[in-house]
Amino acid sequence: MTDPTALPNFGQPAPTPGTGAGDTSGAASLTDKIVGILGGFGFNPQIDSDGDIMYSVEDQNLFVRVMEGEIALIRLFGQWQITDDITSDLTKRLNAANDVTLSLNIVKVGIARDMVVVSGEHLVTPDLDLEMVLPSTTQMILQATQLWHQSASSDGPHAAEGGVPAFAQPGEGGAPAGGQA
């Protein structure tokens, strides 16, 4: 099988002026719009060395990666070093990531070395309300990180083993009794 990382990267096709969310002719770039919105919420956005927008919420550094094209895509994400108070058992860490990813919409959780990475992605269409999407996805990422920590610190059950994670069980700090989270 061919190693997909060895395939050539042809990049994104250049957008045709006047089409799609990637159009920057005569208008602020999507990155500029996002920086303005995050600044308006007091999140102190800055462009980092990778070209991502870094911003701070509740003393946590989060990022937005903008991928412009015919239809633009934004990825909001955070990454945290896993501390010694969390199990070093990779299976438990991955089960916790799976629990959160399967329990929530929009966000996904993964493990990369000793980091937990939480992200949410959105296609940027002309009618997307960035002033609603950016803060709501930010809160989902922070909540998902807390749920991952809770699940990684517990003895289960886990979705991969056929169980319902503790944070998603009615009456146990998860979903309200008689309802869904």
Image (tube, helix red, strand yellow):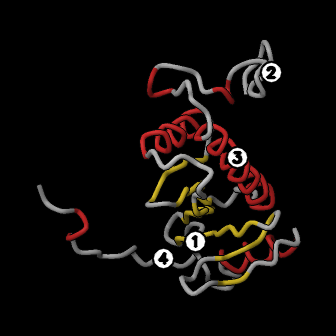
Question: How far apart in space, not on screen, are marks 1 and 4 (Cα)?
Answer: 18 Å
Q: With respect to residue 122, does 46 lie above or below?
A: below
Q: Which residue lies under the disc numbered 2?
A: 176
Q: Which residue lies under the disc numbered 4?
A: 16
Query: Where on the picture, by quarter, is residue 73?
Result: bottom right
Q: Which residue lies under the disc numbered 3?
A: 146
**Residue at horizontal 79 percent and vertical 58 percent from the top:** 135
**Crowding near the residue tagged with mark 3, few <14, some 14–19, many ≥20 C-alpha atoms within 10 Å:** few
Q: With respect to residue 173, does 23 lie above or below?
A: below
Callout 4–callout 2 Cβ contact below 8 Å: no
- The tag on residue 11 is none
**Residue at horizontal 77 percent and vertical 71 percent from the top:** 56
Q: Position of residue 12 (x, y in %)?
A: 40, 73
**Residue at horizontal 71 percent and vertical 80 percent from the top:** 32
Q: Amino acid at mark 2?
A: Pro
Q: Nearer the viewer, mark 1 or mark 4?
A: 1
Callout 3–callout 4 Cβ contact below 8 Å: no
Which tag, 3 or 4, sits closer to the chain's start?
Answer: 4
Which tag, 4 or 2, sits closer to the chain's start?
Answer: 4
Q: Is residue 128 visible?
A: yes
Q: Nearer the viewer, mark 1 or mark 3?
A: 3
Callout 1–callout 4 Cβ contact below 8 Å: no
Query: Where on the picture, by quarter, is residue 102?
Result: top right
Q: Which residue lies under the disc numbered 1?
A: 66
Callout 1–callout 2 Cβ contact below 8 Å: no
Q: Amino acid at mark 1?
A: Val
Which tag, 3 or 2, sits closer to the chain's start?
Answer: 3
| Label 3 element class | helix
Q: Amino acid at mark 4?
A: Thr
Q: Nearer the viewer, residue 121 or 91?
A: 91
Query: Where on the picture, by quarter, is residue 150?
Result: top right
